[in-house]
Amino acid sequence: MKSFVVKTIANAVALGVATWLLSDIELTGTSTGRKVLTLILVALVFGVVNFLVKPVVKLLSFPLFVLTLGLFTLVVNALMLLLTSWLAGRLDLSFHVDGFWTAVLGGLIISIVSWAVNMAMPDDKD
């Protein structure tokens, strides 16, 4: 359970950094508390998308992973971010990614920041 919370917080921080760095990833809200709550909810949606959809996409596109020596991961991460943006719109969350190339760069930023935050935060796997 603690691992789930740590990963959700790491994703929320990573999504926040991506919205801060890229103007085409929008997070609107009236107050800081509202924005933080939206980031946490979007991080939950992002986690569910990565848990349910990403393995299927990776399995179906395995030949492309081999052919590109793993660089196709950037495309898959971008697609997961775009799917999260679409689902956030359907759930009335104020989070939007505008365009594929923004999603590619955002996916790269989210991957790096999420990895760094996961390394810095304690995780009880003992």
Image (cartoon, grey):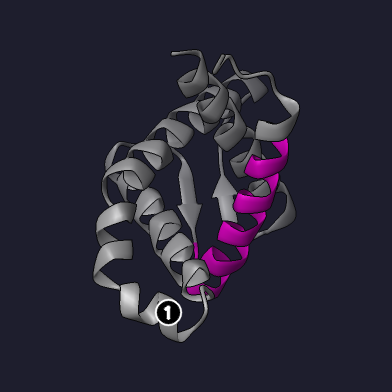
Residue at the farthest bottom position: 67
Residue 88 shows up from this direction: no
102 left or right of 20? left
Residue shown at 72%/40% (left/top)? 116
- Segment colored magenta: 98-117
Residue shown at 54%/75% (left/top)? 71
61 left or right of 104? left
Q: Nearer the viewer, residue 107 or 95?
A: 107
Q: Nearer the viewer, residue 115 or 49?
A: 115
What predominant SS class does the magenta segment belong to?
helix
- Residue 9 vertical position relative to residue 81 in the rendered view, above or below: above
Q: Position of residue 101 (x, y in %)?
A: 55, 74
- Mark 1 — residue? 66
Q: Position of residue 58 (x, y in %)?
A: 33, 63
Tell me, yes or no, whether the highlighted magenta stretch contains residue 124.
no
Residue type beneath disc 1? Val
Quadrant of the frame with the N terminus? top left
- Residue 73 vertical position relative to residue 19 in the rendered view, above or below: below
Q: Nearer the viewer, residue 77 or 71?
A: 71
Q: Position of residue 27 (x, y in %)?
A: 56, 43
Residue shown at 38%/46% (left/top)? 50
Q: Secondary structure at mark 1?
A: helix
Count residues near mark 1 (Cα–Cα under 10 Å), then give few for <14, some for 14-19, many for 20+. few
Residue 67 shows up from this direction: yes
Residue shown at 56%/36% (left/top)? 11
11 left or right of 93? right
Report the number of discs. Answer: 1
Quadrant of the frame with the C terminus? top right
Tell me, yes or no, whether the highlighted magenta stretch contains residue 104.
yes
Residue at the farthest front position: 126
